[in-house]
Image: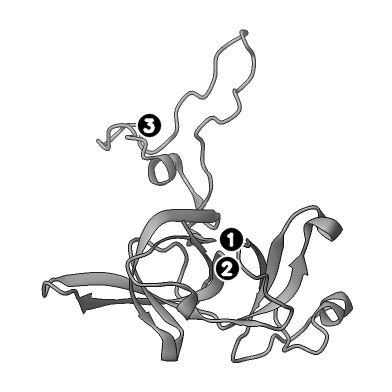
Amino acid sequence: MIQGLIGRKLGMTQVYDDNGSVVPVTVVEAGPCLVTQVKTPENDGYAAVQVGLVEKKAPRKLSKAEKGHLKDMAPMRHLREFKIDGGEAPKVGDQIMVNNFEEGAKISISGTSQGKGFQGVIKRHGFGGGRMTHGSHFKRAPGSIGQCATPSRVFPGKKMPGQMGSRKVTTKNLEVVRVIEDKNLLLVKGSVPGSKGGIVVIRKN
């Protein structure tokens, strides 16, 4: 059994549970995916499956290496590897659908968080800043960042202004509320990283 799937975040909606309560959910289009390569301990040193996301619109450009790797398959740009949890190993060309997941299961979703651009320390790290009164020369500045002659440097990891967001983020223990097989949709309860339309990787816990 393959332990994951590639998908695309579509947005948010809400559904009713069995008790009649409203549950906010994120809609993820999971798959369909094709097995593009099977890795074995004999050839690669470990057992895994490489999977590609089949999209409605073919990618504009692929390198010769990518075209050769995906020979006799639909062109795919997004490839990921997943572990195999026992059972019969899939074959190249096998299709993996959203029915690989079941309602109530716990999953982890990885994606690229929304980019916020270059930000200061107040927005990026939650600094308090100085007084906003008239005449104050210390409002949103970071302040002193180091010592004097000893150690004569700034320690690594110092909280300073810089690029915020646009990083790989993994949210764990998300709950699958509903599986819509005919539309390849997962309704997930919890915070799914990324923007609308962003590529996400779904893994079983």
Quarter-wise, where is residue 47 in the image?
A: bottom right
Q: Residues within 10 Å of mark 2 (few under 14, many from 20)?
A: few
**Measured Cα–Cα span from mark 3 to mark 2:** 62 Å
Task: Mark 3 vs mark 2: give the one in front.
Answer: 2
Residue 205: where, in percent of width, then height? 46, 56
Residue 189: where, in percent of width, then height? 31, 66
Quarter-wise, where is residue 196 in the image?
A: bottom left
Q: Which residue is mark 1?
A: 85
Q: Residues within 10 Å of mark 3 (few under 14, many from 20)?
A: few
Residue 176: where, in percent of width, then height? 35, 68
Mark carried by residue 145: none
Does residue 28 appear to the left or right of 53 in the view shown?
left
Residue 158: where, in percent of width, then height? 53, 30
**First of labels 1, 3 by sequence position:** 1
Q: Amino acid at mark 3?
A: His
Q: Secondary structure at mark 3?
A: loop
Tell me: residue 57, above or below residue 102. below
Residue in the picture at 71% in, 83% down = 93
Do the numbered discs 1 and 2 sit on residues whose CB atoms are within 8 Å? yes
Instruction: In this rendered view, identify the residue nearer to me: 86 or 6.
Output: 86
Residue in the picture at 72% in, 77% down = 91
**First of labels 3, 2 by sequence position:** 2
Tell me: residue 84, above or below residue 125. below
Residue in the picture at 43% in, 91% down = 182
Q: Secondary structure at mark 1?
A: loop
**First of labels 1, 2 by sequence position:** 2
Do the numbered discs 3 and 2 sit on residues whose CB atoms are within 8 Å? no
Q: Amino acid at mark 2?
A: Met
Mark carried by residue 137: 3
Q: Which residue is mark 2?
A: 1
Task: Mark 1 vs mark 3: give the one in front.
Answer: 1
